[in-house]
Image (tube, grey):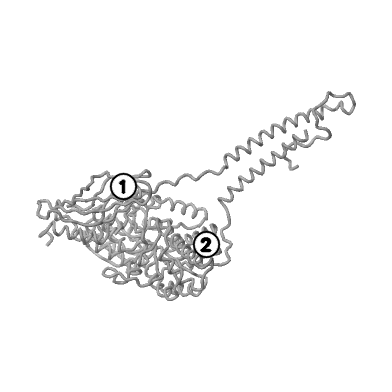
């Protein structure tokens, strides 16, 4: 009887222990520490607009880089290294971005920087980073000149060895939009508006050139002041021009009200823009008037990428307050490219960072290749992403819906 | 011990003897019957615990990860422009040909259901005709024949002309555009200029 009881107790304890073990193994899969146990701290700088009109995109960039470092630390992706981020707010201004670049260069633990959002800000930072041999990977700069030089249309020449980007350039985005608008949306008369900034004016120019080549007519052009929210004068000009479509080179804080005011002026025609308007905030700002408006954005639709689904799930699990927005996946991939480059440098130096780690990371970045959130991540001889996919979206049912996707294979 | 299992009865735990007629043991059934009951309970518990442990082990057994879903066909397929050839510039309906190469990069085969182009004034046929299959990790050359149906509507100098392709694999059927690049754009413009002759001047 005692033996039976002992067996019973032993069995019960064994069952309990097994239960606990089983529960424990589930916990191991879903939980874990966010930080690694590395001896060396490597800082990945982030520069983006964290306040102001464009902060929705900027905070999405910052959070996505933060997520990449957390995943790398959790997986101990680089043995002996713990990643941290240092995020600086450029407020969307070139001068502030340049000061931030100097600050990041001064921190010896910074071995790479993700950012910025705006091409004009990127332009102001490139030289600072390149002089310090500090790698910069932008998830969002689309102006072709940043990688291919100011005369990119005639002769491509890389200006800075340390600058890379995961976003597709406007040299493809503008013509891609023009092809869609002319051939498929069957719009033949366009009114082109831009915000005079590097990104907006550049994108409007590449769109216009292709639209004309296809046989389209430009019935009017205007520049707006990005500080203003009253575009009624421009809206009236659009109405009177007889345009059947508006192309806007700029960002959503202006594009939303502009779309609304154009429709209020009586021109019930779609506004088309680039990745700068591809934001949930555009839909909020344009209201009902925005339905049917179009945006091109870099990359494949998120729903077609299994890797993106994992990113979305991880982002949600971290509980970030802000959405990852248009550049979340590209920011994660930009950060991961830096992590991969650091890994290569560490592995090539017997598991330790060399004295000239920054220069070595720049060299390693050129050969980085991995399957990222947005597809295959690698860089060409100019520092541009080799994955050149673009998607047309339209505002439908309070959200952006995929219309068409294309890949540049030339 | 920890609240799990029956409390150990005092004294002997041998099988029960017939009840002796002693005052102490007269109250035996109050002790013994629960003891018998306990042993039955212990046995039942053991069975349940073993069953539970077995079920738990079965449910939490390491299982091989399910094979990853195949990627969307546009993510495994690319099209490259190879070269262009004007066939008959003097024909009533001028035609020219260009050759592209379809490449797949994963193990899954892809079927090209259709290839078209979005420009008015042009029609396009492929050889071999669609639907055509491209095996996994393979490539296939496709000759596209362009017929100019209306010179006045063709794009004279498109910078990034598309090919619109419908693809299918085991994952999905998908429409996708391929932008074949600057060399294709140049060659297409030249071919159209030859095909349409004076109408472009």
- Same chain under badges 1 and 2? The reply is no
Residue shown at 74% from the left, 34% from the top:
A4
Residue shown at 57% from the left, 52% from the top:
A31
Q: Quadrant of the N terminus of chain A?
A: top right
Residue shown at 66% from the left, 44% from the top:
A17
CA gap, disc 1 and disc 2: 39 Å
The residue at which mark 2 appears reads as A78
Q: Is residue B131 above or below residue B101?
A: above
Q: Is residue A143 above or below residue A2?
A: below
Please tell me how crowded label 2 is: few (under 14), some (14-19), or many (20+) other residues with Cα within 10 Å: many
Q: Chain of mark 1?
A: B
| Residue A190 at least partly seen | yes
B141 with respect to A354 (left or right): left
* Residue B127 image offset from top left, x and y in percent: 22, 47
- Is there CB contact under 8 Å for labels 1 and 2? no
Which residue occupies the extreme right position in the image?
Answer: B23
Please tell me how crowded label 1 is: few (under 14), some (14-19), or many (20+) other residues with Cα within 10 Å: some
A173 with respect to B29 (left or right): left
* Residue A182 image offset from top left, x and y in percent: 24, 56
Could you say which quadrant of the image residue A384 lies in? Answer: bottom left
The residue at which mark 1 appears reads as B134
Q: Which mark is residue B192?
A: none
Q: Quadrant of the C terminus of chain A?
A: bottom left
Q: Chain of mark 2?
A: A
* Residue A297 image offset from top left, x and y in percent: 35, 58
| Residue B75 at least partly seen | no
* Residue A77 image offset from top left, x and y in percent: 52, 59
């Amino acid at each position: 009887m005692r033996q039976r009881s002992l067996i019973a107790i032993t069995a019960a304890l064994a069952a309990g222990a097994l239960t606990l073990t089983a529960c424990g193994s589930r916990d191991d899969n879903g939980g874990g520490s966010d930080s690694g146990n590395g001896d060396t701290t490597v800082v990945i700088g982030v520069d983006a607009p964290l306040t102001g009109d464009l902060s929705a995109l900027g905070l999405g960039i910052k959070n996505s880089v933060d997520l990449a470092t957390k995943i790398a630390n959790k997986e101990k992706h680089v043995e002996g290294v713990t990643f941290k981020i240092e995020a600086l707010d450029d407020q969307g201004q070139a001068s502030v971005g340049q000061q931030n670049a100097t600050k990041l260069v001064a921190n010896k633990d910074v071995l790479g920087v993700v950012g910025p959002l705006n091409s004009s800000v990127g332009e102001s930072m490139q030289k600072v980073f390149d002089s310090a041999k500090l790698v910069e990977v932008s998830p969002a700069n689309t102006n072709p000149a940043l990688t291919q030089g100011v005369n990119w249309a005639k002769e491509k020449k890389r200006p800075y060895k340390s600058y890379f980007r995961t976003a597709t350039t406007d040299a493809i985005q503008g013509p891609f939009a023009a092809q869609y608008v002319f051939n498929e949306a069957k719009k033949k008369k366009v009114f082109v508006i831009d915000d005079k900034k590097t990104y907006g004016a550049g994108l409007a120019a590449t769109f216009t050139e292709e639209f004309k080549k296809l046989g389209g007519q430009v019935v009017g052009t205007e520049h707006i002041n990005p500080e203003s929210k009253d575009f009624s004068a421009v809206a009236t000009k659009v109405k009177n021009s007889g345009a059947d479509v508006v192309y806007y080179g700029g960002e959503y804080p202006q594009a939303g009200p502009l779309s609304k005011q154009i429709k209020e002026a009586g021109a019930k025609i779609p506004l088309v823009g680039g990745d700068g308007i591809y934001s949930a905030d555009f839909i909020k700002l344009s209201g009902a008037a925005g339905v049917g408006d179009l945006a091109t954005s870099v990359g494949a639709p998120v729903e077609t990428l299994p890797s993106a689904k994992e990113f979305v799930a991880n982002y949600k699990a971290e509980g970030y307050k802000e959405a990852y927005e248009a550049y979340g996946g590209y920011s994660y991939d930009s950060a991961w490219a830096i992590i991969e480059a650091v890994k290569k440098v560490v592995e090539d130096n017997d598991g330790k960072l060399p004295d000239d780690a920054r220069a070595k990371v720049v060299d390693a970045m050129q050969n980085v290749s991995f399957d990222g959130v947005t597809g295959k991540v690698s860089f060409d001889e100019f520092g541009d992403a080799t994955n050149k996919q673009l998607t047309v979206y339209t505002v439908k049912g309070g959200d952006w819906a995929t219309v068409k996707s294309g890949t540049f294979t030339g | 011990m920890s609240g799990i299992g029956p409390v150990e009865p005092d004294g002997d735990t041998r099988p029960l003897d017939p009840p002796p007629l002693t005052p102490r043991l007269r109250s035996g059934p109050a002790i013994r019957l629960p003891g018998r009951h306990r042993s039955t309970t212990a046995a039942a518990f053991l069975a349940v615990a073993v069953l539970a442990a077995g079920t738990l082990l079965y449910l939490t057994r390491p299982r091989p990860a399910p094979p990853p879903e195949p990627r969307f066909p546009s993510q495994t397929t690319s099209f490259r422009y190879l070269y262009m050839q004007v066939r008959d510039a003097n024909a009533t309906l001028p035609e020219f040909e260009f050759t592209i190469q379809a490449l797949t990069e994963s193990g899954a085969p892809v079927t090209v259901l259709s290839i078209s182009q979005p420009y008015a004034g042009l029609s396009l046929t492929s050889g071999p005709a669609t639907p055509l299959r491209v095996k996994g990790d393979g490539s296939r050359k496709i000759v596209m024949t362009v017929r100019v149906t209306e010179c006045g509507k063709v794009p004279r100098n498109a910078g990034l002309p598309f090919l619109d392709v419908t693809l299918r694999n085991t994952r999905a059927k998908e429409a996708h555009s391929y932008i074949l690049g600057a060399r294709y754009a140049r060659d297409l413009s030249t071919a159209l200029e030859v095909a349409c002759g004076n109408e472009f001047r």
